[in-house]
Image (cartoon, rainbow, N blue to C red):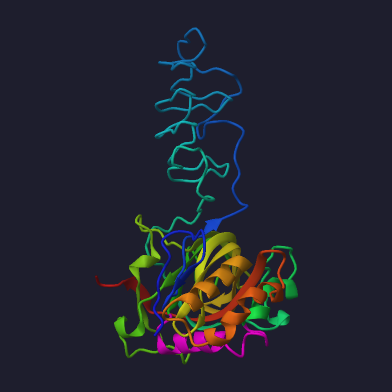
Amino acid sequence: MIRNMVKLTLVAGLGIGTSVYGCAKATETGAAKTDAGTGTGGTTDAGTGTTGTPDSTGTTGTPDSTGTTTGTPDSTGTTTGTPDSTGTTTGTPDSTGTTTGSDDGTGTTTGDDGGGGTTTGVVDNCKDTEKYSKSTGHIVKLFAPNAAEDYKCDSNGDKTVDKADGSLNDFLVGPLISGFIKVNDTLKESVDKGTLNFLLDLHCYEAGKDGTNIRTDLLVGKDKDKQVDPTCSDLDGKTMCEYYVDPKSYDNQGKALLSVPNSTVTAGHLSGGPGDFSFSFPISDGLAIALEVKEGRFEADVSGSVAATNGRICGKVSKQQLLDGLKAACDSPTAPSFCGTVKPLLGTLGGLIKCDGDVCTVVLGYDAVPTKGLKDAPQ
């Protein structure tokens, strides 16, 4: 039986697990901007100095070693608060002057950057502070498309959708390997049995309306036999069930590990990303390979609170990760039955998977139905 598990951190290599499905924290890419100064916030004047009684360097208040001050900042963007040796901003500055707290409008994110001055993603403009939104869906169909016309997701980010967006799909569900590994059969069985429960949570999405600044969270639910009502089934698309969320869907600060901020809904179509995350890809009963997805995207047609059709999760993955994962699985004491046939071919599979060097592309399709709501699973 397949079990759900959420990765707590981004995967540096490839993980193999028995009965494992999950996801890890998404990092939005390409959206952050930085300003030219070293400080943030504050109202700037047109001059180079501030009010008050200046000291020898022309600044007010009690200057530090560089003469930066409290009070109204000048055009260099220095602000109130306790300055450090570089004259940085409010809050608790780090050694480079990048501050914690609110974004200054230039794309610097909230949270502590760990003292290195680099941010941890883009600003999340969704102001919903509730753990679970009112727009949640349960994924009742999950599959790997096997034809380019069904990919419907720009995995490689070239602004077109074509065969190049599913090079790994060609391998996983193509004629070469499908005789041994039944990926789509495994996915369907796991979803139908309730041992693979993915939950979609759209914060700041108002049912049935277009919008921006939507935070898309993908969560993992408990197995069906551990759910709020184990007898409830929504596979008919009409019944609505309530779901317990596995606590491993969140980091130790209570934030969803797989979360894409600033998604949009336009004309009923959800689009989120690109962002980086890890996803445990099930390829047979009892075996899932943790793939590190780069520049991943979420797409779907959404309605209500929240139904999704034509859903897609796509992005770039490493060919070597897949091959290493298959090898480790076949070398383990609990090797899947297909290894008897596949293992002798592992040395040549790399040449048979047609990718752009080590960079492969992958697409997963999904549909979701609305839920009655999500809640924390009992400990």
Residue 30 coordinates in the image, percent (x, y): 63, 52
Q: How many marks?
A: 0
Residue at horizontal 51%, vertical 44%?
119
| Foreground pick, 86 / 320 | 320
State the residue at coordinates (53%, 56%): 27
Quadrant in the picture for the N terminus: bottom left
Q: Is residue 186 left or right of residue 35?
A: left
Q: Is residue 346 visible?
A: yes
Quadrant in which residue 75 is drawn: top right
Residue 173 is left or right of residue 332, and the answer is right
* 52 relative to 33, above or below: above
Vertical placement of residue 209 versus 372, above or below: above
Q: Position of residue 235 (x, y in %)?
A: 46, 90
Left or right of 315, for residue 356: right
**Residue 294 pos. (x, y %):** 59, 61
Q: Is residue 305 magenta?
A: no
Q: Residue furthest top?
A: 56
In reply to whether residue 176 is colored magenta, the answer given is: yes
Quadrant the C terminus occupies: bottom left
Counting from the top left corner in percent of width and height, residue 6 is at 41, 68
Q: Residue furthest front?
A: 344
Taking the spot 50% from the left edge, 48% from the top edge, the residue there is: 120
Instruction: Write the start and end of the magenta stretch as one range.
Output: 173-196
Q: Is residue 155 above or below residue 213?
A: below
